[in-house]
Image: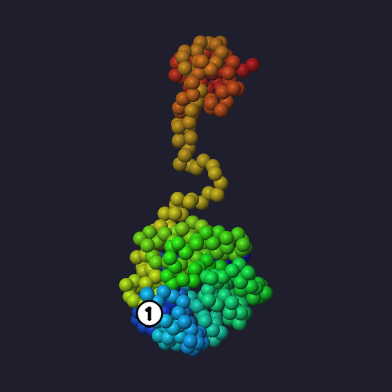
Amino acid sequence: MKFNFNSVNFPRPYIIAEIGVNHECSIKNAYNLIEQAKKGGAHAVKFQTYKAEKLASKNSPAYWDTKKEKTKNQYELFKKFDHFNYKDYLKLILFCKKKKIQFLSTPFDEEAVDFLNKHVPAFKIASADITNLPLLKKIASTKKPVIISTGASTIAEIKKAILPFKKKGNKNICLMHCILNYPTLPKNANLLMIKHLKKKFPKLTIGYSDHTLPDDEMSSITTAYMLGAEIIEKHFTNKKTLSGNDHYHSMDYKDLLKINVNLSNLKNLIGKSKIKSPINSERLSRKNARRSLVTKVQINKNEKLKYNNIICKRPGLGISPMNIKKVLGKRIKKTLKKDTIIKLEHIKKY
């Protein structure tokens, strides 16, 4: 069963603008980011619901590029941005409803799951929690659709991660190809892994969570879509020049607009037909650009058609050259002038 929200097929690709903690604990800024994501054409915005004390020990070293985000301790960084409480998230949920954009948030502890369960159509699990069995089981117990990022994971680990959901009868799972680098260098993006995930998990939806730096063409996103990603997630900001945290590898609403234009163009180029066959716009070309058997010289009544008195020329309104062997040696009913398209009615039947 392919991924959906509330049994309603979702747009493909489904684009999630991950605000995460780029709001920097400002409700006003969070509202602005939601509006910008909607303006850019995202289907959903995603936040992160956590408290630093439940997420990282005070001795957790960084795993990101410390040239971009200078904080070298996970607890210290997460503590900077964990000030929203459940009342704040309720404000964001209501604002998303008002703006007609889906609200999502990644829970990082079981209490966050209980809160979010009433407010999200699906759960998102971060790459770093793919081995967090208690959290996986808690989310699986909700029986809601789940989006699992697979950064730094093996196929064996992914199979173990989806087991709690399958045990609950939930096959409504999306696996997101992801590289757990902030930022991800283009040479490390390895988008072909999307095809590998599709091969290994053919019954599940496959998506892509992008951590590469945005380029002018947003090529990582369009390439991921071409390789089969049905859900696209990327960090989102309203100012890419802001220092630290996730701003430096985030997209903004202009990037989002570009993505949607690119995807629209790609959808038009790809088309809907999965079968190679002539299309309506080719009808005229099929007739006029193909060739027919044409008289090379004048051929008199009762004279036989031979290789030396016929030629293959456009348009294709007569006998196809594919049938030349069927008419060679046949006599014609009446004299045909040079450069006449030969048709079946010109040939005697015997």
Location of residue 28 by image quarter: bottom left
- The residue tagged 1 is 70
Residue 115 appears in the picture as rendered? no
Q: Residue at x 38, y 84 (%)?
A: 25
Name the residue nearer the viewer: 350 or 112.
112
Task: Pick whichever, 132 or 25, lies toward us.
Answer: 132
Residue beneath the point at 48% across and 77% down: 105
Q: Is residue 176 above or below residue 73?
A: above
Colouring chosen for the image of the structure: rainbow
Classed neighbour count for the residue bearing mark 1: other residues with Cα under 10 Å, few (<14), some (14–19), many (≥20): some
Q: Please report the residue visible at 48 percent of the width from the left and 50 percent of the height from the top.
A: 271
Q: Position of residue 329 (x, y in %)?
A: 59, 15
Residue 294 percent location from the top left of the image? 48, 21
Task: Answer left or right for 205 relative to 264.
Answer: right
Q: What percent of the width, then of the height, locates residue 123?
A: 54, 75
Where is 202 relative to 318, above or below?
below
Image quarter where the N terminus lies is bottom right
The amino acid type found where label 1 is placed reads Lys
Q: Please identify the quadrant where the C terminus is shown.
A: top right
Work out whether residue 198 or residue 57 is closer to the camera in this orientation and state it.
57
Residue 339, image x, y percentages: 44, 19
User: What residue lies at 45% left-to-right and 16% top-to-bottom?
Assistant: 338
Q: Is residue 68 above or below residue 265?
A: below
Among the 4 quarters of the image, the one containing residue 85: bottom left
Mark 1 element type: loop
In the displayed image of the protein, which residue is found farthest to the right? Answer: 167
Residue 238 shows in this picture? yes
| Label total for image | 1
